[in-house]
Image (tube, grey):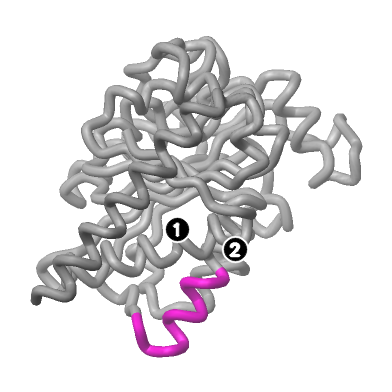
Amino acid sequence: MRLVIQENSDLVTDWAARYVLKRVKDFNPGPDNFFVLGLPTGSTPLGMYRKLIEFHKQGRISFRYVKTFNMDEYVNLPREHPESYHYFMWNNFFKHIDILPENVHILDGNAADLQTECLAYEEKIKEAGGVHLFVGGIGPDGHIAFNEPGSSLVSRTRLKTLAQDTIIANARFFNNDLSKVPKQALTVGVGTVMDANEVMVLITGAHKALALYKAVEEGVNHMWTVSAIQQHPRALLICDEDATLELKVKTVKYFKDLWEVHNELVEDIQQQS
């Protein structure tokens, strides 16, 4: 697991966008070779989406041969509702790039049979060849996607009842009216995320500091589902300084020093080529 520490949240989302850019370009997708990207919603990745849109407008990246799978969606919230994840993704990202609508996959929280919808989603991921890079965020309680504390670490896409802390945290998007916040969501499972070739998690703000501590310095624990990525062969955590407040000083120093060595090696390779 790699931990990349940036000074502030803007640098976190900028770094993440550049990483997605590099991964897609290195893959060199084409009509018979799609790059598969897992995506989150929420305020944390918004800056990443804005930067990727900027890169697209500059001609630095195309999404024509990219397939996307979003992490989650509320249940019984109309797609056109401004807080639905369909609305969020199309208005904040997809409509500004050249991705084809048939290559966008978002769970349908209004499906007649939610169980069938979840099983079909897993099958679509398999048919796409699996996710190459899954980008995610976490909640203050360490949940990834809507895999709330206590979720199985081998869980698959399914219906989840949201924890009260999550409902309270999301109330700000519904005029602070708890009665309007959906109580259930469809979500990819921890196991679904872990199946990806690579996982990148964005963590910003002091309110996420305890979750980052649990993910980095303590063991794998189903009460902090993001901790499962400790067992992923290619896991990357991108955080700001505020999110490191619960980490030991020597932990922060270790990862900063490690990243400096990595950057020096990259520079040496580039100079030799």
- Give the answer, above or below, for where 211 lies relative to 4: above
* Residue found 56% across the figure and 40% down from its top: 109
* Residue found 35% across the figure and 39% down from its top: 2
Identify the amino acid type marked 1. Ala
User: What residue is pinned by disc 2?
Assistant: 47
What percent of the width, then of the height, locates residue 42? 63, 49
In front of the other: 272 or 211: 272
* Residue found 44% across the figure and 46% down from its top: 4
- Give the answer, above or below, for where 54 lies relative to 21: below
Q: Which mark is residue 121?
A: none
Q: State the extent of the magenta-drawn residues as a range.
A: 50-60
> Is residue 55 inside the magenta stretch?
yes
Identify the amino acid type marked 2. Gly
Q: How many marks?
A: 2
Q: Secondary structure at mark 2?
A: helix
- Give the answer, above or below, for where 228 lies relative to 132: above
- CA separation, marks 1 and 2? 9 Å
What percent of the width, then of the height, locates residue 61? 34, 79
Tell whether 180 sits left or right of 36.
right
Instruction: Tell me which secondary structure the magenta stretch mostly adopts.
Output: helix
Q: Which mark is residue 16?
A: 1
Tell whether 206 sits left or right of 198.
right
In front of the other: 85 or 190: 190
Which residue is farthest bottom? 58
> Is residue 235 inside the magenta stretch?
no
Quadrant for the C terminus, please. bottom left
